[in-house]
Image (cartoon, grey):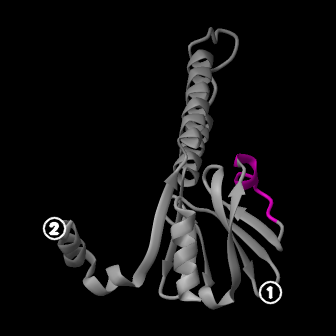
Amino acid sequence: MQELESRVDAAVGPAARRSVRYSRTRVSYSIICIAMACAAAVALATWLVWNSDWSSSPPPVIGVPIVLLSAILAAGAIFSCFTVEVRDNKLAWWFGFGAFRREVRLSAIARAEPDSASWSEVHRIAFRRSKRAYGATGGEAVRRMLHDGSSLKLQAREPQALLTVLAGQS
């Protein structure tokens, strides 16, 4: 453990490591499987169309399936991981490699409580301004009530640890 901490200190510096109070990433293997299945279906359909008899018409443009495959795999890579982090008096969350990053100052959080988030709740695209939910899979979550009256539900890998950090920071 000591060796790992010294490697982290050498890579990012001890001050940067200490400024992170909570950082957990949750991976949704179901999203990865769905994206791969969709990509395989598009690839199979493209192969079947491309290898059919084209004596009466020219073969289709191959660029469309390539763009479609790329979009499916990129969406799967981005939305399969969800990270929640508390650092420098800010609560931040993002998908994948930093896509759709959002931050809230800890002072803007009125209270936090444990909650749960269904798979369909964290995967919908339309969010209401007053009530939002973010995550990669369903399961345990932490609901934050903000001072402006809006509710924010974040799926958390370790919700009790996040609640402890938020209670100590507010």
Residue annotated with mark 2: 3
Q: Position of residue 88 (x, y in %)?
A: 47, 87
Q: Which corner quadrant of the image does residue 63 belong to?
A: top right
Question: Residues under labels 1 and 2: Cα distance?
Answer: 44 Å
* Residue at (68% x, 71% y) in the render: 113
In the displayed structure, 14 sits above or below 117; it is below
Q: Quadrant location of the N terminus?
A: bottom left
Q: Position of residue 120 (x, y in %)?
A: 75, 48
Helix, strand or loop for disc 2: helix
Name the amino acid, label 1: Asp
Q: Nearer the viewer, residue 97 or 24?
A: 24
The residue stretch that appears in magenta: 119-127
In the displayed structure, 43 sits above or below 136; it is above
Q: Quadrant location of the C terminus?
A: bottom right
Residue 148: which disc? 1
Q: Position of residue 54 (x, y in %)?
A: 64, 12
Q: Is residue 21 visible?
A: yes
Circle 1 residues within 10 Å: few <14, some 14–19, many ≥20: few
